[in-house]
Image (tube, rainbow, N blue to C red):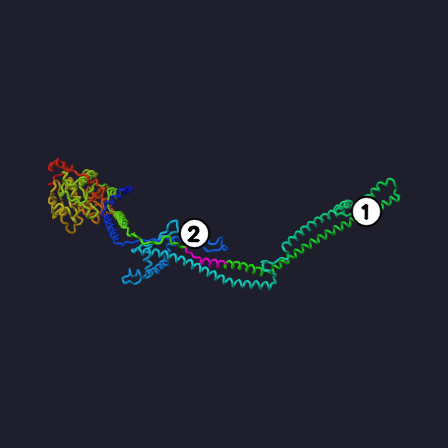
Amino acid sequence: MDSPEIHSTPESRLHFLDYWRIIRIRKVIIISIFFITTIIATLVTFMMKPAYSSTAEMKIEEDMVSDISTFNSGPGDNAPYDPYFMETEIKVIQGDVVLTKVVDALNLNVEWGKKFNPDGSPLKTEDTIELLRHYISLDADRNTKLIDVTVYNEDPKLAAQLANQIVDSYKEYRLDLHKSQMLNGISVLQTKYDEEETELYNMQSNVDYLRATLGIHDSGHETTPTPTLTEAQMESYNERMMESQAEYMKEDNQLAELQSLQATNPQALRDVLPTISPDDMLSDLLGKLRANEQKYVTETNYIGIQNPDYQSMLSLSAKLNQEIDERVNGQMFALESKVMSEKAALDALNAEVQSAESNDQAEAVRGQPYWEAKLVLQDRQSLHQLLAAKIESENADAIIPKSALVTIINPAQPGVAPVRPTKTLNIALGAFFGLLVGIGLAFFIEYLDTSVKTIDEVERVFQAPVLGVIPQNVGTLIDQGMDSSHAEAYRVLRTNILFSRKDENFNSLVVISAGMGEGKSTTCLNLATVFGQASQRTLVVDSDLRRPTLHKLLRLSNNIGLVNFLLKQNTLEEVIQHTGVPMLDFMSSGKLPGGSINILGSGQMKSLISELKQRYDFILFDSPPIMGLSDASVLASEIDMAIQVIQYRRYPQLMNIRAKQMVEKVGGNLVGIVLNNINMAQDESYYYYGGYDYSRSEDSQAAATAKPAGGDDRMGIQQKY
């Protein structure tokens, strides 16, 4: 078995006219809610008592941070910027603290108790505050420090009095709060100051005890031990040590060089030593030695070795050399002694400095507890002095008035004219709200309504063509006449059915619907009437055995009919009745006896259909609702064609879709859909279906020129009787 073809559902797009259609259809709801809301708004507006307004304007400043220069860079800086300050203060003004001051100042508990309590008893403060809040409106001017306090009341003087009192109460609250904070802060500082006084006394006693116990010498201003060597003395010692060190190094180097010459070249030492360590005696001896040697060299050529002068010169040279050597040795010894002396002096100076430093370190270690305790004491004394200065500053600041925290710019004045209610605005808003609610409710009802509404919707959802559109409140064409404005809708339906036939031999048609009251029987009868008026032999059969209707519309008898023929109680000629319409016959349902429920599915029914197809050009069957009953499904399976009548905006789409599926499941040939009971004037989607009418229909003209029924010579069609 081939699987059924699945049709893709086209995408639905809403147009502006779709919204306008919903508004037109639901205009009764929209207009009703619009007028009801407008009337209510008007009545409420005129019932409201007139109210006057009075506005007091004030400027508010943030609290100042009271500090002194010893604690920060400047005396008296502003508090950090708070972006929520104005909003916070508005909440404060509306708070219980400020409003309680207003209630107490104006004795509102008693005054409003007389006004609002039947027995005149005073109101509770919380009730009065809540009532007062309804009269107050606060507004902060943007980018300013100004707040407008507006009060609404029936009494203009009371409104002004309340506004001014609220401003005064808020100002008093700010001043009291600032003063309370200052006094609390001073109290805390004073307590801290007294506690530190006792602690400082104990610390001072501990320092004095350590000084006496450790034997510390302190003039009272030092915070560390006094060193043995002052800084100037230490600097002088360092300079002397550097000079002695340099001198010692210089002479030690010279001594080393001279000692090296003495060991390697004593003669050179004689010449060098006088330049390093001047000595007149050594210089004189060297001069004499050089003169004697020069004389010796000069006279050697003239005198002999044995000459007494020669011997005398030798003796003198030897004596001079001995004296020079002794003098050189003496000088070298003197230099060595000097170097050793400078080394000893340098070592002594260094030892003296090290001894002083050792003494200072020992003294520092010994007196460390004292000096540490004294340093802590001095730090605490400095903070204590700052705390004392802070207390003095806060005391002075508390005395200075802070009236600039809240400044009244414009006091409230009694209003001249009432500001509430604004009648025009209230009525306009009521009308607008009513219109808005009405439209919203209309669209909400439309959203909840899942019934069939438009042709496009039917063809998109049901995947079946719409063969006809029947207007609202259509009766039978037999009563209204074929020239009725509604007849053309059925002529269009007949034409579409003829063109929708898959086979020209299909001449039997069953009219079905999903539920009761969709106009199925009226559609069946009027369609048969149109077929008869077109000079086509037509039979309409009332196959709704449970609740037959067609005999009532035709005003004919239902004593015998389809049931009697199927039970073989009467012949076909006996159960067929003539109507007032030429070429149109009628077969009623007859009386259905008990136990004959499935009679439409019998073989006798199939034989009847076959015989009627031979006798008539078209046979139309009226059927019961297909949902819940099997009769309509049986008829749809046995008859050539089926059309489904769907009443406009009556049953949900799913119910009608289910009816279509039931026809298709039994193998019925559903040729299309008929939309019934449509208000052409209300729904613009169908205006063109009812906008044209013939004075004399095409079918009427065809009936006038058609041959009589007795002259029909078509093959296979027998005469009726």
Against 93, is 577 above or below?
above
The disc placed on residue 81 is 2
Q: Residue flagged by tag 2: what amino acid is it? A: Tyr
Label 1 crowd (10 A; few <14 / some 14-19 / many >=20): some
Displayed quadrant of residue 214: bottom right
- Residue that badge 1 annotates: 321
Q: Residue flagged by tag 1: what amino acid is it? A: Asn
Secondary structure of the residue carrying tag 2 is loop
* Residue 382 percent coordinates (x, y): 53, 58
Q: Residue at x 44, y 55 (%)?
A: 64
Secondary structure of the residue carrying tag 1 is helix
* Residue 491 percent coordinates (x, y): 17, 39
Classify the position of the N terminus by image quarter: top left
* Residue 271 percent coordinates (x, y): 77, 45
How many numbered discs, if any?
A: 2
* Residue 357 percent coordinates (x, y): 64, 56
Against 614, is 74 above or below?
below
Assign the magenta stretch its main secondary structure: helix
Is residue 611 in view?
A: no
Classify the position of the C terminus by image quarter: top left
Residue nearer the viewer, 463 or 443: 443
The residue range painted magenta reads: 389-403
